[in-house]
Amino acid sequence: MTIVDLENVTFAYGEQPAVRDVSLTVEQGDFLGLVGPNGSGKTTLLHLMLGLHRPDSGSIDLFGEPVDQFDDGERIGYVSQQATSGGGSMPVTVREAVTMGRFAHAGHGRLTDDDHATVDDALETVGITELADRQVNQLSGGQRQRAYIARALASEADLLALDEPTVGVDAESRDAFYQLLESLNEREITIILIEHDIGVVTDRANRIACINTELYHHGDTESFVESDALTEAYGATGQVVHHHH
């Protein structure tokens, strides 16, 4: 199943183009790393994929529907950079935040025992059961990112979209977080990840889209590493550094 399909998408802020003539697809089960230098249009492209921006030209389908008609939001778990780096002001407990992911399934009815069990499973999956009664605004960045992932799991999201989710997170927590993402991807949850550390992306993702306004590469990770896309998109400063843990 195709999760996201972009055809010849262009978007500008005023006169300044952010994304120009980009075509790519994200298939179910992909772990797509979205890379490019600062200001290259990565976040804009992700917002276009999720329907948060409307393209100036081109077409975007999300789960097989035109993105502007898609209304099944619980299928998407979106974690912005602000959510983990500065989004800790939510005056609720971790369990309450994760439970929000069930509301779309409950409709106007009360949450059932099955709904609460799903919340418990989500907390356990991301390893924060012991934090369930803590206030979200008392969590570290690494703990907060797991709470937002748990909320997406509780909503039974098919797509996780993550914009630099490890900003401000220590190396040990970051490695554990990417192990979590890999395990979720093995469960056929599709992941789109923006990450400034290209070595981390090439070690973890199985697909790479490299952008600097225009798309320089979209394909499997091995072909990206072997291509000149990094140098073309970043200039002479682009290089891949692999992390071995």
Image (cartoon, grey):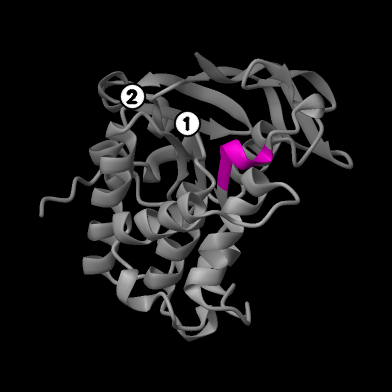
The image quarter containing residue 186 is top left
Question: Of 195 and 174, which appears nearest the observer?
Answer: 174
Q: Residue furthest left?
A: 245
Q: Is residue 76 left or right of residue 26?
A: right
Task: Please tell me whether residue 25 belongs to the stretch shown in magenta.
Answer: no
Alpha carbons under labels 2 and 1: distance apart: 8 Å
Q: Main secondary structure of the magenta part?
A: helix
Q: Where residue 64 appears, x then y in whole percent?
A: 65, 15
Where does the image place residue 62, in percent across and percent down from the top left? 65, 24
What's the amino acid at mark 1? Cys
The residue labelled by disc 2 is: 224
Q: Reply yes or no: does residue 74 show up in magenta.
A: yes
198 w.r.t. 177: above or below: above
How many neighbours does mark 1 have within 10 angstroms: few (below 14), some (14-19), or many (20 or more)?
Answer: many
Q: Which residues are magenta?
A: 73-77
Q: Nearer the viewer, residue 90 or 220?
A: 90
Give whichever of 226, 125 is nearer the camera: 125
Under circle 2, the secondary element is: helix
Q: Please, what is the three-letter code of the amino acid marked with disc 2? A: Phe
Residue linked to disc 1: 210
Locate residue 143, reporting x and y percent: 39, 71
Asked if the residue under mark 1 is in contact with the one under mark 2, i.e. CB atoms within 8 Å, the reply is: yes
Helix, strand or loop status at disc 1: strand
